[in-house]
Image (cartoon, rainbow, N blue to C red):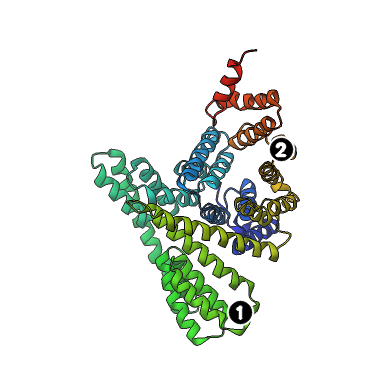
Amino acid sequence: MPEVSLKELDARVRKQFSNARTAVERGNFEYCVEICSSLLLENPGCLEIRELLRQAQQSVFTKRGRGWLQRFVCKLEAGLVVMYGKPYLKKDAALAMAYGERALTRDPLHEGALSLVAAGAESLGFYETAVFCLKKIYERETKDLALMQRYCEALIKVGETNQAVAIAEQLKRMKPDSSIIQELVKSASVAHSINKGKWAEEEQDFRSKLKDEELSDALEQQNRIIQDAQGARVRARELIDEIHEDPQNLDLYKQIVKAYLYADDYREALAWLDKAALLPQSESDIALKHLRSEIMIKATELELSKLHSESGPAPVERIEKLEAELEVLKLEESRKMVEQFPNDYAQRLNFGELLLAAGKVDEAIKEFQVAQRGTSLKQRSCVMLGRSFSKKRLYDLALEQFDKAIADSHGMDNFKKDVLYSSAQCCESLGKREEAIRRYKLIYANDISFRDVARKIDGFYSEPS
């Protein structure tokens, strides 16, 4: 089964993809994840959709600013989803890939999830997709011989023979006596020689189809630019020249700000944003205003990340101050997005979660109630409403919302166990001891290690009858 490009898909799919891309530009990454995940179920061989999904997954993960404990929990949850998905590799590879993507929504760099998506792609002949996933693992783990061999084989199949040869040679140095690796080195070398011959034959024809060699170089440069932070800096330097030639072009200023953002150079990004703000047309440009908030959020997240990763005792006061600033920045940015896009229910849900975390319970309830209008967000909105009512000690109202979410949840995954546990706590607060134990038992029967349900059940049965 060959991979397909976006332009080969029908107009409906292309329109949905366009909506997802717009959502990313607006910072609504959760909505993009929702759309792309749905599209990939029907079109698992479209790499462009998967690339956009991965970008959104990473942005959601980063935006939430998880601590080490939350990251550990996410990694654990992703591992469980991978475990459920692996058996489908032989009977439904596309479904196995969907499980992998679901796990990556919890942890975008989970090696098991990336490997599962790659394995499904290999099974279906989607070798570019396999390379896309395996590359992420290889960049973090370069001593896994099996992974390197698998990555090398996939690179050969997609014609990336330069890198395939380099990895094959690296494998040979690591395990010189392996006959399998020696064969892989030969395969990579032969494939590279064949490709080299093809390039020599096709290069002239390729360039002749372009108007001139300068245009060819520009296209090649642009393709390279999007790959890494260094390329972003190169693009930024080119944009400086373009701005000197056309100093009133606001779009050029936006591009250079985003280029520096990609390179994590927030000082330069802010400096160019300030220059853009001097242009008369910038006053009515909402996207430009959002860029400033995005820069401040990313800069604060980066500083927090560095503080957490530093050896030695962490500066607690500085960390607490930055976390408080980050909370305010995210809240204000989310508020602006809701004001600008009042019918975007995913933004409403995100805003409500930030309000609840900030202790503004009544405001959060209002946003969750509106977010329930989004069909795909109803279950999560019910849970968040339940948590909000619980904070106000309105346990009967909270229980009603938790029960709605439980009714819509099939199977006993971590999400359902979490909601069941919260509903049981509400029952306890309402004095419904027997009903609370019944709910704890449902969790206990599926996962004895979930939180403290084992202690609760043991305590219940040890009581005098």
Q: Which residue is mark 1?
A: 282
Q: Nearer the viewer, residue 376 or 52?
A: 376
Cα separation, mark 1 vs mark 2, equals 49 Å
Where is residue 196 drawn, in percent x and y? 36, 61
* On screen, residue 22 above or below 422: below
Q: Is residue 93 left or right of residue 271?
A: right
- Residue 190 appears in the picture as rendered: no
Q: Is residue 245 left or right of residue 149?
A: right
Between tags 1 and 2, which lies in front? 2
Q: Residues within 10 Å of mark 2 (few under 14, many from 20)?
A: many
Q: Quadrant of residue 293?
A: bottom right
Q: Residues within 10 Å of mark 1 (few under 14, many from 20)?
A: some
Q: Secondary structure at mark 2?
A: helix
Q: Nearer the viewer, residue 397 or 6?
A: 397
Instruction: Compare marks 1 and 2 and give the one earlier in the sequence.
Output: 1
Q: Residue furthest top?
A: 465
At 58% from the left edge and 16% from the top edge, which residue is drawn?
A: 462
Where is residue 108 drawn, in percent x and y? 50, 49
Where is residue 40 drawn, in percent x and y? 61, 49
Q: Hey, what amino acid is under mark 1?
A: Ser
Q: Hey, what amino acid is under mark 2?
A: Tyr
Q: Which residue is mark 2?
A: 395
* On screen, residue 75 above or below 351: above
Q: Quadrant of residue 277?
A: bottom right
